[in-house]
Amino acid sequence: MFRGLRQKPVIQIKTAEQVESMRAAGLLVARTLELMRDAVRPGLTTLDLDALAERHIRDNGGVPSFKGYHGFTGTICASVNEEVVHGIPRAGKVLRDGDLLSLDCGAIVDGWHGDAAITVPVGEITEERQRLLEVTEAALWHGLAAGRVGARLSDMSHAIEAHIRSQGAYGIVEGYGGHGIGTEMHMDPLIPNHGEAGHGPVLKPGMCFAVEPMVNLGAKETVELDDGWTVVTVDGRASAHFEHTFAVTPDGPRVLTALDEGEAWFNRLGVVQNGTETSS
């Protein structure tokens, strides 16, 4: 979501205890997304899902990050088909069989933020759309895997782009990307989903980022609608969006918004975590 970037970004460093506080926020986001994933079906509205998310976050001691943010009216961003990000939940937005639905959710617990997104099928979707989901989610995890101590910030961007390019002619959205996160939802630095490796600040323990590739079936070009929020593809083709918040640690990337902290995906990719390297 974040589009601002300073020339010399100041990256907030968290203590181990503060990372644990962010894990509490991350778990609440993860469980809220799973609740919504299970609820998605044709005939439901995006406002129904928004109400479900807000109730779950507040009932579990959290505060929705998005609601009221620069005037945003929803607890979640709910973006359907050609809507890339920032879709406003609406009573008139009815989900239909074959839709793709991006659910972006943030929560604050004890002053610390968690932010994550998934894109889910509504009913039965085409093989082309299913493949888009798979490519985008895998790109996210390649980016997260690059978030190791001693790496450069742009190594994550490059890993995301490299995976997507290897999978076919997809449009990688520009102008939107990941961001720092901690005591605020959107902090420096910006993390584009494309670029060369080896640039930007060196990653250090205690840095926390939200990484979020957005990938289109067609061209990369997007436009913001007159509502001031919803971003759509110019060619009207579908888009997918996945996001996780993670912490850079001496033992490898720790995904704070994944129920298993990323273990299953990192095992698949052969990523070092907790000092142990697995084979891909």
Image: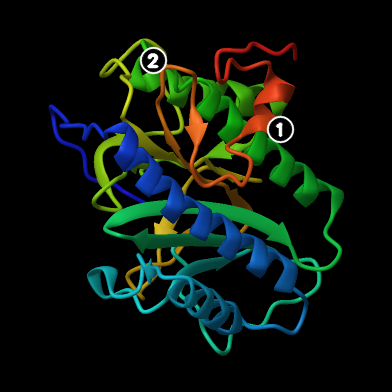
Residue placed under numbered mark 2 in the picture? 149
Indicate left or right for 18 with 80 as reference.
left
The residue beneath circle 1 is 264
- Image spot of residue 64 (x, y percent): 38, 69
Q: Position of residue 195 (x, y in %)?
A: 41, 22
Report the residue that reaches farthest toward the bottom: 91
Q: Is residue 9 above or below residue 134?
A: above
Vertical arrangement, residue 166 with respect to residue 176, above or below: above
Q: Which badge, 2 or 1, comes first in the chain's sequence?
A: 2
> Which residue is rendered at x = 48% and y = 71% of the image?
60
Residue type of the residue flagged with mark 2: Val
Kindly state the secondary structure of the residue where label 1 is placed: helix
Counting from the top left corner in percent of width and height, residue 67 is at 35, 74
Residue 44: name its quadrant. Answer: bottom right
Q: Is residue 96 visible?
A: yes
Residue 194, above or below 257: above
Tell me the residue at 36%/75% (across/down): 227
Mark drawn on residue 186: none
Q: 118 or 230: nearer the eye? A: 118
Q: How is the structure coloured here? A: rainbow
Question: Looking at the image, which is closer to me, 245 or 16?
Answer: 16
As helix, strand or loop, the secondary structure at mark 2 comes to: loop
Query: Dot 2: few (<14), some (14–19), or many (≥20) neighbours within 10 Å?
Result: some
Which image quadrant: the C terminus?
top right
Outermost residue, front side? 17
171 with respect to 11 (left or right): right
Q: Amino acid at mark 1?
A: Ala
7 on left or right of 131: left
